Image: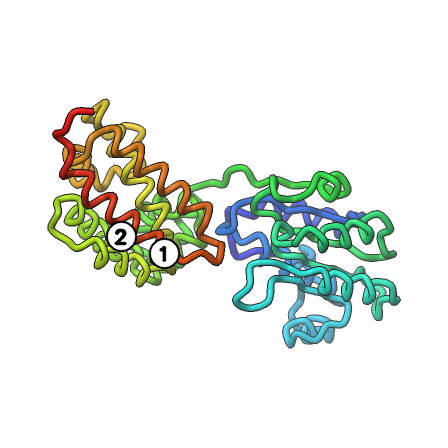
Amino acid sequence: MLTTYPWLNVLADKLTSYQQQKRLPNALMLQGDKGLGLATLARDFSKQVFCLKPTSKGSACCICSSCLLFDAGNYPDYIDIKPDEGKLTIKIDTIRQLSERLALTGQFANPRIVIIDPIDALLHQASNSLLKTLEEPSDNTCLILIAHKLSKVPMTIRSRCQIIKINAIDKGLANQWLEAEGCEQSLQYLVLANGQPLLAYDLWKKDGLGHRRELLDGFIALIKGQLDPLVFAENCLSKKEFPIIKWLTSWLADAVKYKHSNTAKQHLNVDLAEDLKVLSSKLHLNDLYSLLDKLGQLAQLESTQLNQQLLLEEFSVDCFFASKIKGHKR
């Protein structure tokens, strides 16, 4: 099989059909959530294209010289572009270097493949530079662009790519895969990861449910006035590898829903119903909306250079005092 991720089997078959019919697009864009494994699939497909002795089903043999070169990271006609370690963006110099390499002839008869992961990480000037490459594609070359947020990709680039969107996956297959990996709380982790199986896997390995429980206990203690706001902010910062802002937002959103209905239908955190009912009872509806607005601002500023600790401290102080003025008239 081309992919070890069963929820991508349909996409894997489509890519294989391009190869078998010898009609690889000059530019192919795979669009879907980060936790679906699109980049891994693209890399596995590249190895399959390069393979000199594919199996009867078209899969890479893993033993020919091309497969061995690819596995060693030395295949000359394969270019994998991503942000530098610790960075979130791809700079123009990287794309210029790509253009220079593509101006040269490939070393093998099989197509060259370039993967840009993710394409929405390109800075504005880098996007303009890539556009020139797309407008004058190199012979026997396929660019595979991974897009997580299509809205961030310029229309000029999108219009020059064949786009395949992964709008939804088979949650049953994702759940089975997680269970086979040893995750006993697979359904809960899939919900926690918004249906993204690789994110669910990562959260499971890091005991995400345990950390979420710990953070929620602290949040409720904060709202009750039993925990210092600065201590709560520090706890949030210590868990920055987790989607803290998303968790907090989902709890407050559910608390708003409990203001209107005591049932858990359509709620994001059904397993936390009793805790979130307590949260709802402690905060005025106006305060819930105000805190949600602040979290929205925090989410927009997460990837900036602004002092995240200061922003979290301000939010925590607002939460601390919100419940104390609940009884006041508006």
Left or right position of 288 against 296? left
In what quadrant of the picture does the C terminus appear? top left
Q: Residue at x 44, y 50 (%)?
A: 197
> Which secondary structure lies at badge 1?
loop
Quadrant of the image containing the N terminus: bottom right
Q: Position of residue 225 (x, y in %)?
A: 12, 47
Q: Position of residue 111 (x, y in %)?
A: 80, 60
Residue occupied by mark 2: 212
Report the residue marked by disc 1: 242
Image position of 171 with respect to 207: above or below: above
- Any part of residue 243 in sight: yes
Neighbourhood count class around disc 1 (C-alpha, 10 Å): few under 14, some 14–19, many 20 upward = some
Secondary structure beneath label 2: helix
- Residue type indicated by callout 1: Phe
Residue 310 falls in which quadrant of the image?
bottom left
Q: Amino acid at mark 2?
A: Arg
- Return the residue nearer the eye: 171 or 131: 131
Above or below residue 223? Residue 228 is below
* Residue 74: percent from left, percent from top: 70, 76
Q: Are marks 2 and 1 in contact (CB under 8 Å)?
A: yes
In the figure, residue 40 lies in which quadrant? bottom right
> Looking at the picture, how far across and down is residue 107, in whole percent?
84, 70
Residue closer to the observer: 1 or 330: 330
Position of residue 242 in the picture relative to residue 30 (left or right): left
